[in-house]
Amino acid sequence: MGRSKRPFPPFAFDRPPCRRRPGSHGTLTACARSPPPPPVWILAQAGPLPSADPPVPVTEDLIRRNAEHNDCVIFSLEELSLHQQEIEKLEHIDKWCRDLKILYLQNNLIGKIENVSKLKKLEYLNLALNNIEKIENLEGCEGLTKLDLTVNFIGELSSIQTLRHNIHLKELFLMGNPCADFDGYRQFVVATLEQLKWLDGKEIERSERIQALQNYPVIEQQIREQEKAYCLKRAKDKEEAQRKLQEEHENEGKKRSNPGFDGHWCTDISATLPSLESKHHFQAPEIQEEHNKNKIDESEDDLEFWNKPSLFTPESRLETLRHMEKQRKDQEKLSEKKKKVKPPRTLITEDGKALNVNEPKLDFSLKDDEKHNQIILDLAVYRYMDTSLIDVDVQPTYVRVMVKGKPFQLVLPAEVKPDSSSAKRSQTTGHLVICMPKVEEVIASGRQTSKNARTSLNSSREQTSRRNKQIEKLEVDPSKHSFPDVTNIVQEKNHTPRRLGSEPKIIPSEEDPDFEDNPEVPPLI
């Protein structure tokens, strides 16, 4: 939901300016071209108008979420930023954060300064763009040096006298408040707070302070008269705003008391819509036309609200917030009706077959490690994702990984042991590595294959031996056949070839009587 950002005070307009949508930029345009009257400032004396929704409270969880720079520790917190949180009341901060030095509370809906008096170490307090109407309850902030109250609704300028106790206060911002338009505003502030060095971003000269102190009695009387007239005007405008709010509530109550869209308690559907048998083809266009008509009416009401003249008051800011909250709730209801509930993704079919699913759209690789007899899945999980967002489930035939609630499922090529599986995550890449050992049957099958190989080798040898035996049976038997015996054609004895013209060598033997064994002579080879 967008936060309300109301325009700055219309200093140059005579008539009340139009509303501006939050987030819009640029200057405001007058609603009428006629010469405008001076700006009207409103100061609430009674309590704030009731809002449609309860105010946003200052909770411990809210402070911890904005204390990340201090490891979510709030008791030693020195700087806290709670801007644009739609806070309407200050509470608990002075009890939980006693050591605060800087507190940012700008652009909220705070109507009163309270529960900060125990912050003795507070040096800078920013309350710009709120609904504050009086300066109070800051006497206990002994170390306060800078106070920013830009663009609020402070009309009682005499309330700055409570800041005299803040002796260390050096800078004060009051621009954009109704009191800044009073005659003698700057002189009164300079003379009242003698410790100030800067006012509205402008340095206070010594001569300026001397002159302001000299004219202080006269200036104080003028400020009192302007405050009195302002408060009377503010009371009348406050009553008028309450009356308008009461009328709006009554109109809404009348609309809710008529549940039927034809003005009766029980709507006759058959009288308003055509029957299904006779005019079935006219029903859908009429319903669509009714829906478009309601949508056009809502857009016209919204346009009328933003173009309606409005004063820059606390009531107008609260009214804008209620209108935007109502629009947000209507939009949520419409989106809930249009929202279609996605059916859960099917991971396992009715017959028990697992499917391959990659809903998180992650890269992966599946490796079959035969050396260690295991299957390795490498899933490219996001590097900076917290491991608590990952859930791994290994089954005998598939593996499932839930990544931020999105399933990644993969069917395995072999059966694995879920109890012996392990999942690790890389500290450098963030990848998830799942090691899944295979079951024992895979190893047994490997042994069977080796036995089969041995039996096949033996069978081949037997076949070759049988062939040899069959070849011997095919030899020619001379007793049965008249064919010549070709097996004895070649003589088995090897005859050494003789050389022509060469005498045969005579090798002496030891039995020869002429043989002499001389040890000096090497033996013949």
Image (cartoon, rainbow, N blue to C red):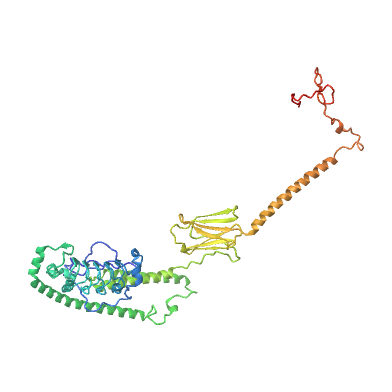
Q: Position of residue 3 (x, y in %)?
A: 31, 67
Residue 382 position by quadrant: bottom left
Q: Residue furthest bottom?
A: 265
Tell me if residue 519 can be seen. yes
Q: Position of residue 8 (x, y in %)?
A: 22, 66
Q: Residue furthest left?
A: 214
Q: Quadrant of the C terminus?
A: top right
Tell me if residue 150 can be seen. no
Asked if residue 197 lies left or right of residue 267, the reply is left
Asked if 311 appears above or below 416 in the picture, the reply is below
Asked if residue 181 lies left or right of residue 77, the reply is left
Residue situated in front as seen by the camera: 6 or 510: 510
Residue 230 position by quadrant: bottom left
Asked if 132 appears above or below 508 in the picture, the reply is below
- In this rendering, the count of numbered labels is 0
Residue 262 position by quadrant: bottom left
Asked if residue 186 lies left or right of residue 326, the reply is left
Asked if 13 appears above or below 436 in the picture, the reply is below
Q: Position of residue 500 (x, y in %)?
A: 81, 18
Q: Quadrant of the N terminus?
A: bottom left
